[in-house]
Image: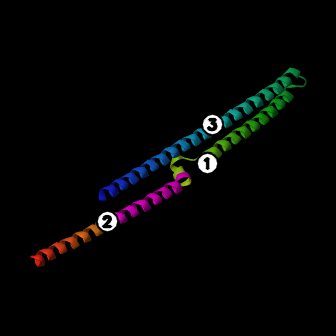
Amino acid sequence: MENTDTEQAKHELAKAVQDALKLISDGVLEASNKIANDANKATSAMASAALDANRLLASQASVAAKVVDTKQGNDHDLILEVKTIQTVMLGEIREIKDGTAKQLSDLQSNKLDIKDSYPVMYKKDVETALTNHEGRVKILETNMTRIIAYGVALMVVVGLAEFLIGKFWD
């Protein structure tokens, strides 16, 4: 009887280890998928910012070419026009840069690190599973203690009966 309880306890412990490994494996897989998704978002944001900057440069270059082609007025007017275009371009590039930096910052602050994922995603499930396993192990320990106590009591009774029979029977 004791051997069966020991085997059952071993089985329960093996199941608990299996469940814990599955939870950890699932957590690593989910966290790596989240990291890959965030990396794709960051790449997309940078590509979008580069495309916006390229469009801005192309549009401003065409405006500058028109100014140079017209050559109506003196050099001072041309310099003022180019300076204005340069100021506008620098301001728009700065806005694109700031927007890209903010998007990357937001992605970094919202990402979920593997070390941070346990309390958020897995702690409740692991604690529930552990509580369940601890309860089952406690029940097995209680049953094993009862069996041992009954066995010892039975052995004492049999020993006492043997002593009494040996003492008074002869």
Q: Residue at x 27, y 67 (%)?
A: 151
Taking depth in this image into account, of 121 and 70 the one nearest to the observer is 121
Residue 62 x, y percent position in the rendering: 82, 25
Write down the quadrant of residue 1 in the picture: bottom left
Q: Which mark is residue 109?
A: 1
Q: Is residue 34 visible?
A: yes
Q: CA distance from mark 3 to mark 1?
A: 15 Å
Q: Is residue 116 visible?
A: no
What residue does disc 2 label?
147
Front of the two marks 1 and 2 = 2
Front of the two marks 2 and 3 = 2
Which of the marked residues, 1 or 2, is nearer the chain's N terminus?
1
How many numbered tags mark residues here? 3
Q: Amino acid at mark 3?
A: Asn
Categorize mark 3 by other alpha carbons within 10 Å: few (<14), some (14-19), many (20+). Answer: few
* Element type at mark 1: helix
Q: Amino acid at mark 1?
A: Ser
* Element type at mark 3: helix
Magenta-colored segment: predominant secondary structure = helix
* Element type at mark 2: helix
Residue 44 x, y percent position in the rendering: 67, 35
Taking depth in this image into account, of 53 and 11 the one nearest to the observer is 11
Which of the marked residues, 3 or 1, is nearer the chain's N terminus?
3
- In the rendered image, the vertical position of residue 143 relative to residue 103, given as above or below: below
Q: Amino acid at mark 2?
A: Ile
* In the image, farthest residue toward the front: 169
Q: How did the renderer colour the structure? A: rainbow
On whether residue 81 falls in the magenta region, the answer is no
What residue does disc 3 label?
40
Give, as a single range, the part of the protein colored magenta: 121-143
